[in-house]
Image (cartoon, rainbow, N blue to C red):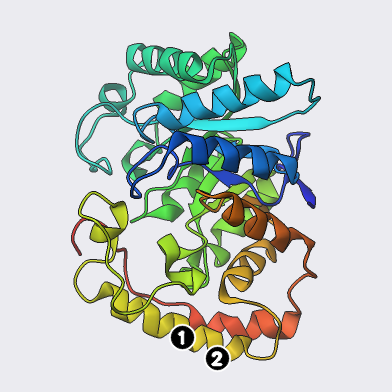
Amino acid sequence: MKFRSFGKHGFNCSEIGFGAWAIGGSWGAQADTDSLATLHAALDRGVNFIDTAAGYGNGRSERLIGQVLRERAAAGKKENIFVATKTPPADGIWPPSPYCKADERYSEKYLRENIATRLDCLGTKKIDLLQLHTWTRAWNKNPTPFKVLRQLQREGLIGLIGVSTPEFDQNSVIDLMRGGWVDSVQVIYNLFDQEPAAELLDVAQECGVGIIVRVAFDEGALTGKFTPETKFAPDDFRAGYFQGDRMSRAVAHAEEIKKDLAGTGYTLAQAALKFVLAHPAVSTVIPGMRTVAQAEANCGVSELPAMPTTLLEKLHRHNWRRGVWYGGK
């Protein structure tokens, strides 16, 4: 496993992190025994960064992570595992609209109560990284939630502070980085969605902000496992994400990428992760892992040679301006 600096914050994180949404639910049936085994397998292979959230099974993902860390500590393992979690806005539309009020969706009372729950679920006294799970550009002029989080940081309840970008307007967090409000940003960046390379990633590097990349596989389309006939259960997140003709369109685009990978030695999934890691601003990429085999495959990508510049440049042509596949679009 290779390690990278987490922005300017003095922490070297594994370049492959553990995305813990699927072990919490919403991605089909998942046994806790499989989740625990997968977490252990990833940590055994050098992963030291785990990303979770309140909304991943209403704390289920966090509780599993806490259990694994306690088990490893009890076994005498000396590890520094960095756990990032997220607090969602209080009940209301997602993502917040331009008319939402920051002090209503992320009030101090709400933040304190929610973070207390996060601490309880994880079984810890301090959260390594607390991220707001979404944002709106409307709050940039007076980002009061981050003022509250800085106070909680001073109280010792939080280590670092971050934000997860709203899918529709990822660049809305650029002002937050330049204003020094966030220590990290979690962003969608992949072979289809390359827009962060235009500005966001460079600003993060200039400001010393850690970058966590999510959706590197485009919810599975960039693993090479799907066909136009692939279907998901109604309670699986991907059933909505790939509704209508989205699956056939995504598979067609993925097949074009495979053509460029012919003879390179990379599978589509390996190339998807290596492409993301090629940008120097990226601190870690957090593919979802549900099985030991997935943990082994994803962690193994770190051991592969860096993607050649000629191939990187060739893959730029797959930037796909499809809009955002959320909210029924």
Contact? badges 2 and 1 (CB < 8 Å) = yes
Query: Marks 2 and 1, how far apart in space?
Result: 7 Å
Rendered image: mark on residue 242: none
Residue bearing the label numbered 2? 259
- Residue type at the position of mark 1: Glu
Instruction: Classify 76 as above or below 292.
Output: above
Which is more toward the observer, 227 or 275?
Answer: 227
Q: Secondary structure at mark 1?
A: helix
Residue 14 in the image: x percent, y percent? 72, 46
Answer few, some or many: residues within 10 Å of disc 1's Cα (few below 14, many 20 plus, some between 14 and 19).
some
Instruction: Classify 125 as above or below 253.
Output: above
Relative horizontal placement of residue 244, taking residue 67 as reference (left or right)? left
Residue 22 in the image: x percent, y percent? 43, 45
**Residue for point 61% across, 11% down:** 156
Q: Quadrant of the C terminus?
A: bottom left
Q: Say whether residue 178 is visible.
A: no
Q: Secondary structure at mark 2?
A: helix
Which is more toward the observer, 55 or 37?
Answer: 37
Instruction: Classify 306 as above or below 181.
Output: below
Residue 285 in the image: x percent, y percent? 61, 53
**Residue for point 37% across, 48% down:** 166
Which is more toward the observer, 140 or 246?
Answer: 246
**Residue for point 26% across, 40% down:** 96
Answer few, some or many: residues within 10 Å of disc 2's Cα (few below 14, many 20 plus, some between 14 and 19).
few
Which is more toward the observer, 158 or 171?
Answer: 158
Rendered image: mark on residue 255: 1
